[in-house]
Image (cartoon, rainbow, N blue to C red):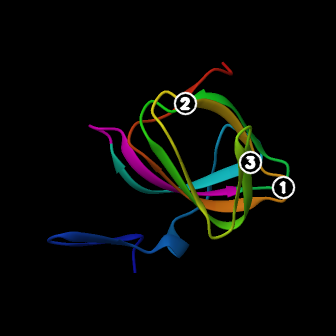
């Protein structure tokens, strides 16, 4: 099976066959599962190594994260395996993990990063 199988109203993604891609952030890898380049909508599977950190960024639109394994932290709290967090448009934060994590993340628009 290819990574994606198209039928008239559905696209099935064989997630295991999608390769992990390094991000520009040390210790964070991702698999792009769905993207609409015209709108910025995207769904990502993200794997964070223990100690990985995402620098200060702004959520241009609502961002949603479901934690599958491990835990994901920011200044407001910790989302652990089986839990969900969403952030409002315009919110800013750093995010990190002490133990590592696997998350499913949904973005309506790409984040804006301030580290460059």
Name the residue beneath numbered marker 3. 73
Please determine whether, in this image, residue 114 is positioned above or below residue 97: above
Residue 23 location in percent, x, y?
Answer: 64, 43
Question: Which image quarter is the N terminus in?
Answer: bottom left
Say which label, 3 or 1, has the lower sequence index: 1
Q: Is residue 33 left or right of residue 20?
A: left
Q: For the residue carrying disc 1, how many other residues have a C-alpha within 10 Å: few (<14), some (14-19), or many (20+)?
A: some
Disc 2 to disc 3, C-alpha distance: 15 Å
Q: Is residue 9 left or right of residue 45?
A: left
Please determine whether, in this image, residue 28 is positioned above or below residue 68: above
Q: Residue at x 23, y 71 (%)?
A: 10
Residue 56 location in percent, x, y?
Answer: 68, 28
Q: Which mark is residue 91?
A: 2
Per the image, is 45 magenta? yes
Q: Main secondary structure of the magenta part?
A: strand
Could you say which is closer to the camera, residue 45 or residue 4?
A: 45
Disc 3 to disc 1, C-alpha distance: 12 Å
Say which label, 1 or 2, has the lower sequence index: 1
Q: Which secondary structure, mark 1? A: loop
Per the image, is 19 magenta? no
């Amino acid at each position: 099976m290819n990574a994606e199988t198209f039928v008239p109203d559905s696209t099935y993604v064989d997630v295991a066959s999608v390769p992990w891609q390094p991000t520009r952030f040390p210790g964070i890898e991702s698999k792009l599962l769905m993207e609409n380049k015209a709108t910025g909508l995207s769904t990502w599977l993200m794997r964070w190594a223990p100690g990985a950190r995402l620098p200060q960024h702004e959520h241009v639109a609502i961002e949603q994260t479901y934690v599958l394994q491990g835990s994901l932290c920011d200044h407001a709290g910790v989302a652990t395996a089986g839990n969900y967090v969403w952030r409002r448009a315009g919110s800013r934060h750093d995010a990190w993990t002490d133990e590592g994590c696997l998350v499913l993340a949904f973005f309506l628009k790409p984040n804006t990063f301030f580290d460059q």
